[in-house]
Image: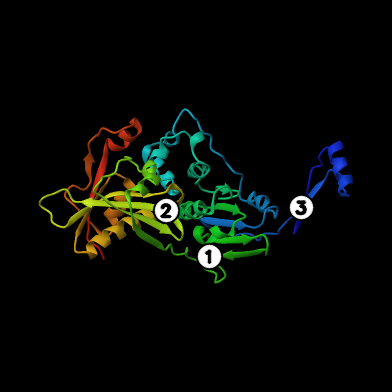
Amino acid sequence: MTRISHPPVQQDEITKSLSRAFEYSFDGVSEFTVPDMPDICGSFNIGLIVGASGSGKSTLLKRFGEEQFPEWDDSKCIASHFDNEDEAMTLMGAVGLNSVPTWFRPYSILSVGEQYRANLSRRLVDNAVIDEFTSVVNRSVAKSCAHSVAKHIRKEDIQGVVFSSCHYDIAEWLEPDWIYDTATGELTYRGSLHRPTRRPEIKLDIIPCGVGAWSMFKDHHYLTEDINASAKHWLCWWGDVVVGFASAIPFPSGTLKKAFRGHRTVVLPDFQGLGIGVRLSDAIAQMHLDEGKRYFSKTAHPRMGKYRNESELWKPTSKNMQERDRVATDTDERKWIARNCFSYSHEYVGK
């Protein structure tokens, strides 16, 4: 342990009165100890320092660099703070901020969880240091954010990113190359038997529901709040928490018999970035296939469309990757999404 002293602070009547009342000896100097963390061997993508508050995490983090914080112009939406639309979609998607309506809002009106992800999306660069990672968001957001960030860092081979946190539960989702625990003084590298090397499985339950459940999700759909009266609906549960919604309608064609198509798939913002949306869509499609029906789906969402293009479970139709015409919608923001972008069209062929 290394003992560090902070420069003396000015004493006044308040500090003198409090020190007398609690019989606490105080001369203006604050001292604390910092663990003697070993040097890191070799290059890495992700490092994690964990431990209780006041255990020296922030001081240790400064060994790797100084934190950088983005500035936000509230006269612009958050998407406008990136160099181009591809970078905006990539980086916001990397932190699980996949709710398209949110992209068009100014930073100040976002929720705490959305603000956290927005800030993080602009900080994922080589040698970044991020203190108190996920400490200000609920644990569901923390886990999904950790997984999304780790996936992006490794895909883009971003080097030397170090996080610190007082929460141990993110380690199995972040899957760092090394972990230093200030409580034990132990430095553990990825692959050690003392730490999990793969994230936990996410087990979901899909339950039929009525159209009333759509009210929880309509504000988060990337194009519209409308829903077809003839649709069938399902809720997606993670344990005892509702995380997603899906619906399907009979295929509007006289040439196809016993065919359905996907109508709505929405995952609540706190749970985006874990791959729940595509798995929910696959599961609904498989249900129809198991019943002897054909299942089609069309989307303008680039992440969903790219997934299906690369998946063996989906077969492109003749309409796939055609440019989507501008359509009349209720806001200028959503017209941007429907203009000059591709529409993805697939049939589910299943396992």
Q: Nearer the viewer, mark 2 or mark 3?
A: 2
What is the quadrant of the C terminus in the image?
bottom left
Q: Is residue 60 visible?
A: yes
- Residue 243 badge: 2
Work out whether residue 69 or residue 221 is closer to the camera in this orientation and state it.
221
Q: In the rendered view, would you say 336 is above or below 310?
A: above
The disc labelled 1 sits on which kind of residue?
Arg
Could you tell me which secondary element the residue under label 1 belongs to? loop
Marked residue nearer the N-terminal end (1 or 3): 3
Work out whether residue 180 or residue 350 is closer to the camera in this orientation and state it.
350
Displayed quadrant of residue 292? bottom left
The disc labelled 2 sits on which kind of residue?
Val
Q: Is residue 285 left or right of residue 149?
A: left
- Residue 113 badge: none
Q: In the rendered view, would you say 71 is above or below 52?
A: above
Query: How far from the left and from the top, in percent, is residue 282?
Result: 30, 58
Q: Is residue 235 left or right of residue 338?
A: right
Farthest-out residue, top: 75
Q: Is residue 119 left or right of residue 7?
A: left
Marked residue nearer the N-terminal end (1 or 2): 1
- Residue 32 badge: 3
Identify the residue shown where x is 79% and y is 42%. 7
Q: Is residue 105 left or right of residue 321?
A: right
Could you tell me which secondary element the residue under label 2 belongs to? strand
Query: How far from the left and from the top, in percent, is residue 324?
Result: 23, 39
Identify the residue shown where x is 32% and y is 48%. 211
Work out whether residue 152 or residue 302 is closer to the camera in this orientation and state it.
302
Query: How far from the left and from the top, in percent, is residue 179?
Result: 58, 61
The residue that disc 1 covers is: 190
